[in-house]
Image: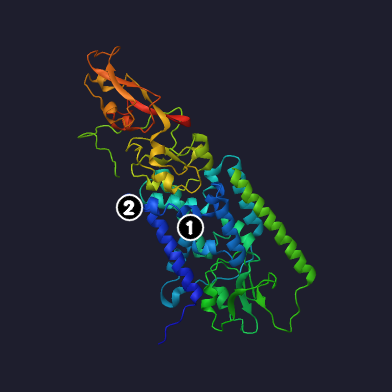
Amino acid sequence: MATKKIPFLKQARQVLACSAFILFVLLFMDWGGVFDKALGWLPRTQFYPAVIGGSIAVAILIIVLTMVFGRVYCSVLCPWGLLQDGIYRIRTAGPKKRRFRMRYTKPCNAIRLGILAAFLAAVAFGFGSIAYLIEPYSNFGNLMGTLKGRTGLEVMIVAAVTLVVLVLFVVKGGRAWCNTLCPVGTILGIFSRRSLFRPVINEEKCVSCGLCGKACRASCIDTENHVVDMSRCILCFDCLDNCKEGAIEYRWTAGAGSRGSVRRPSEEPVAKGSEAAAGGNSRRAFISAAALAVGTAALKAADGQGGIAVLQKKVAPERSVPISPAGSSSVASFNRNCIGCQLCVSVCPNGVLSPAVSFDNFMHPVMNYEKGFCRPECTACSNVCPTGAIRKISVEEKSSISIGHAVYNSFSCVVNTDGVSCGNCARHCPSGAITMVQNMFGSKPDLLVPSINTEKCIGCGSCEYVCPARPVSAIYVEGNEVHHVI
C-alpha cells in the first residue's frame, strides 16, 4: 500500500517547529549549565519579551513576516503554541488518527480585543504578574520551571491548573487558546488578516467535502463560503494535507482581497464598497495594534554542604529591600521589565533565584541565599533574559556591581550564642569586605567577630549562605534599591 505523501510545506513546518521546541526545552532544563550561552539568543526571538525589552527590530521583523507569510511565529517559534500542537497530535493519534471533527466558528473578535486591552491595562497599571498568566512565553517558562523543580508549591499549582486549562482548550478546539486568550495571537492576527501569502481555496476544484474544515485546528476555514480566516490561521497546513482534490494552495495573493479563494466565473465579485470598508477596517486595526504594542514597550551545583548535619532549616531573613540580580540596575527596573518567564530561575546553577509568591510580584524571581550564593563568576541569568530585566553583563562587570550590602546581627552569632569561634563569613567573602575584629561588646571578648566594609561588599550572599546560625543567618544581605559600581 502506497504511503501518503505529506505536503512539503507541512513537513518543513514540522521540522522547524520540532527543532525550536527542542531548543527551548534544552535551554530551560539546562542540564550541566551548557546552554545558557549557546542558546541565550533564543528567548529574544519571542514577540512580547522583545517589545518589553526594547528589541523593536525583532518585534518589527516578526510583524513584517506575519504581514507577508501569515502567523509563522505562532506556527514555528512560539513554544506555548508548539506545546498545543504536541497535545493535539497526541489527541489525534490512533486508528484513523481519531481526528477531531473540527468545525468552522466565527471569530470572537470582541472577546479577543477585550482580553488584549485588559492585558495591556494590567501591565500598564502594575498588575503584570497577573496579566502574564495568559502570556504564552511566561506560561511555558512557568511549566518548564515546575518540571525542573525550581518553583514552590504555589507556582506548581498555577502551572498545573494552566496546563489542565490548556489541554481542555486543545481537546475542545485545537488552537482555541491562541485565538481567544493569547494577547500575542490577537496582535499578530490583526497583522495577518491581509497577509500576502495565504492558503487559497480554488472553488473550481473544490467538491465541498469539508475535510479541510474538519481538520483545521484553528477552526478558521469556512467551507461553505470557501474562505480562510487569516486572523486565526496558524499555518499548520493540515488543510493542504487533507484536501484530496488539491483545491487548496498556499500562494501569493496580493490584490486578491481578504477573501482568500479563487472564485467560479459565474459568481459575482465582491462589491467595491465592501472591499473598501474592509480595507479601512484593516488599516484601523493595524494602527490600533501598533499603538498597543508600542505602548507596552514603555512600560544543584552548589547545594548546602556546610556541615555534617543541619538540625534546623535555614530560612530567608525579612529584608527591608529585596535583592535583584546584577545587570538589573535596580529593584524597580527589574520588577517593571520582568515577565516572570522563570528562565533565569531555570538556568541559575546555584539555586539563588526562585519565583515569589506575594501578590505584588507573584512569580517574579526573587533572590535568597539558603541554597547557595550568587557567585561573582556566574552570569547565566544575564545571558538568557529576553526582556532586558537583567541586561547582559561580563564577569568583570558583575564582580564590581554591588547589588546589596551585608548586615551583622551580633545577638544571633554563634560566637555570642554558643561561645565558639567561627569566621566562616570572612573566609568565604570574595570581595574582602569582611574582616574579623575583637568582640568588644559580646560575652566572649577573646573571640573574633565580623566587621563589614559596606563600600567593598557586592551583596553576593556568600557570608549569609555559609553562616551556621539558625534559623536566620547572623549575617545577611539587604538589597540596594539602586545598584552601584564599587
Q: Provide residue 193's location: percent of width, then percent of height.
A: 65, 64
Residue for point 58% across, 60% down: 179
Q: Amino acid at mark 1?
A: Trp
Residue 31: mark: 2
Q: Relative to 404, does residue 336 appear above or below in the rendering?
A: below
In primary-sequence order, the first of circles 1 and 2 is: 2
Residue for point 41% across, 54% down: 39
Mark 1 crowd level (few <14, some 14–19, many ≥20, 10 Å Cα):
many
Residue for point 23% across, 20% down: 418
In the image as oriented, which residue stretches furthest toward the bottom? Answer: 1
Kindly identify which residue carries mark 1.
80
Q: Provide residue 461's location: percent of width, then percent of height.
A: 35, 32
Q: Provide residue 231's location: percent of width, then percent of height.
A: 62, 64
Q: In the visual, does 338 lie left or right of 258?
A: left
Residue for point 58% across, 71% down: 103
Residue 367 in view in this figure: no
Q: Relative to 412, does residue 151 appear above or below in the rendering?
A: below
